[in-house]
Image (cartoon, grey):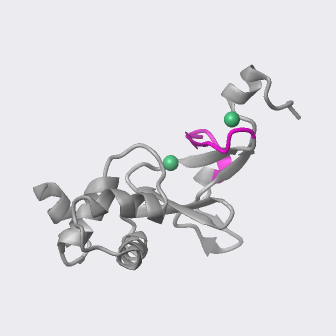
Amino acid sequence: MMQVQETLRGQDIKVTPQRLAVYSFLRGRKGHFSVEEIFQQVRARVPAISRGTVYAILENFTDKKLVHEIKIDFNKSLYEDAAKDHHHFLCHGCRKIFDVEMPGCSILRCKNVQGHVIESFQGYFYGICKDCQVAGKVKKG
Ligand SMILES: [Zn+2]
Ligand SMILES: [Zn+2]
């Protein structure tokens, strides 16, 4: 728990029970979570917290690059620990989101585009996942 507090302080974020609870939940956790899911989880620890507070905390954490906001699924925002640097694949068959790593991809090695300096890049890929192809639930191509 000390490490969590130090990470927050290191980003100039004032440590509150609400912020601690949100960051403790996301830190190192596998998966992608909506505001509602995070709210439900955190409420067990900090009963006084509201959805609006969770949303504001996530906005702040995103600004400070502690968490990534993923908008692969149209207007639904999902959040995850920013320590995991990867891209995302959304399956049209089962709607699952997969983490994908593309270390050899030339786009990811670009440092600037038409004179603009690139600080980060988030790739969203859409298609049919391995499981759905095997199950034959969705036709390829
Ligand atoms: Zn699938
Ligand atoms: Zn991810």
Relative horizontal placement of residue 59, taking residue 43 as reference (left or right): right
Question: Where does residue 17 sit, x and y in percent of width and height?
Answer: 18, 70
Magenta highlight: main SS: loop
Q: Is residue 20 above or below residue 24?
A: below
Question: Where does residue 138 sit, x and y in percent of width and height?
Answer: 81, 32
Residue 97 location, quadrant: top right
As for residue 97 lying within the magenta part, the answer is yes
Give whichever of 116, 21 is nearer the camera. Answer: 21
Question: Where does residue 78 sit, x and y in percent of width and height?
Answer: 52, 59
Give whichever of 104, 38 is nearer the camera. Answer: 38
As for residue 110 lying within the magenta part, the answer is no
**How many marks are shown on the rendered structure?**
0
Q: Is residue 138 above or below residue 87?
A: above
Give whichever of 7, 30 is nearer the camera. Answer: 30
Q: Is residue 83 above or below residue 135?
A: below
Residue ID at (10%, 57%)? 2
Residue ID at (23%, 77%)? 12
> Taking the image as four quarters, which one is ligand 1 found in?
top right
Residue ID at (68%, 39%)? 94
Question: Where does residue 19 sit, x and y in percent of width and height?
Answer: 26, 70
Relative horizontal placement of residue 74, taking residue 15 as reference (left or right): right
**If the image is split into quadrants, where does the C terminus sit?**
top right
Relative horizontal placement of residue 13, taking residue 56 as reference (left or right): left
Q: Is residue 83 above or below residue 93?
A: below
Residue at the extreme left: 2
Residue ID at (35%, 78%)? 53
Residue numbers of the magenta segment: 93-107
Relative horizontal placement of residue 129, taking residue 97 as reference (left or right): right
